Image (spheres, rainbow, N blue to C red):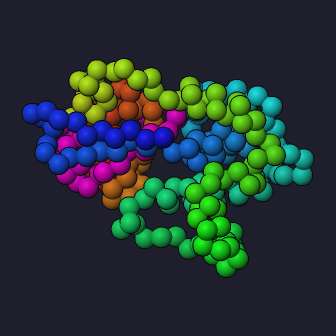
Amino acid sequence: MTDEQELSGAAWPSGMSIRVDRPQALLYLLFVREAWGFAPLGAPALDPPLDPGDSRRPPGITDDAALARWAADWDRATEALLSEHHAPRTPDAETLAALRDLSDSELVAWAEKRPTAFWARGVDDDAFHAWVRLCTPRGGVPLERTPERMSLPALVAAWQSGIRKVVELPFDGYCVERLSPSTLLVSAFTRSVPDLYSRALNEALGG
């Protein structure tokens, strides 16, 4: 899910464009980790909390196996968000197998799909979509009250430092990470509070 924040006005620099993403693949992986109950110690809590519905970890999949596969899928999904200038990671075994065995059209479909192949047997899709709706901001916010407008000075400085995309994920509390020279990750809570969003954007200047 994406929002294009290309806004006009005296304070908005000509040519400045900031894209806000809520990537479906990352939301799916957060849902499955919570629903299957294998989040490692220290993993950020989700806000809003989710109802797993009928989601259950299939028999025979251990915490270690699920977490290892989850980490690989998370890395793959995150890589798709990063700047073309970001150094690519070493392909994992599944990626190498896909490059070797799939046709061009099959490879495109594999790269674009949600990471469901490993998880689908244990995920209640209706529960997932209900949670995504809870994570999706409601429309109708006046232009001057949007998060980017409320934190405009810090946003301009971040844009001047190279930020072109903000990835928003439903983590509880303050969270910020500069994923690449052009991509900043923040929690939905952080982006919803002007002082915290400005703080996060200012912290990105050192990233």
Q: Residue at x 48, y 70 (%)?
A: 88
Q: In the orientation shown, which residue stands out farthest toward the front?
A: 105
State the image quarter where residue 9 is shown: top left
Residue 48 place in picture, x, y as percent: 57, 26
Q: Residue at x 89, y 52 (%)?
A: 60
Residue 103 place in picture, x, y as percent: 65, 74
Within the magenta stretch, is there residue 177?
no
Q: Residue at x 58, y 57 (%)?
A: 112
Quarter the C terminus occupies: bottom left
Give above or below for 49 relative to 160: above
Give above or below for 154 relative to 133: below
- As rendered, which of 95 and 203 lies closer to the eye? 95
Residue 19 place in picture, x, y as percent: 34, 45
The region drawn magenta spans 153-175
- As rendered, which of 207 and 114 lies closer to the eye? 114
Q: Residue at x 23, y 54 (%)?
A: 161
On the picture, is 87 further left or further right than 34?
left
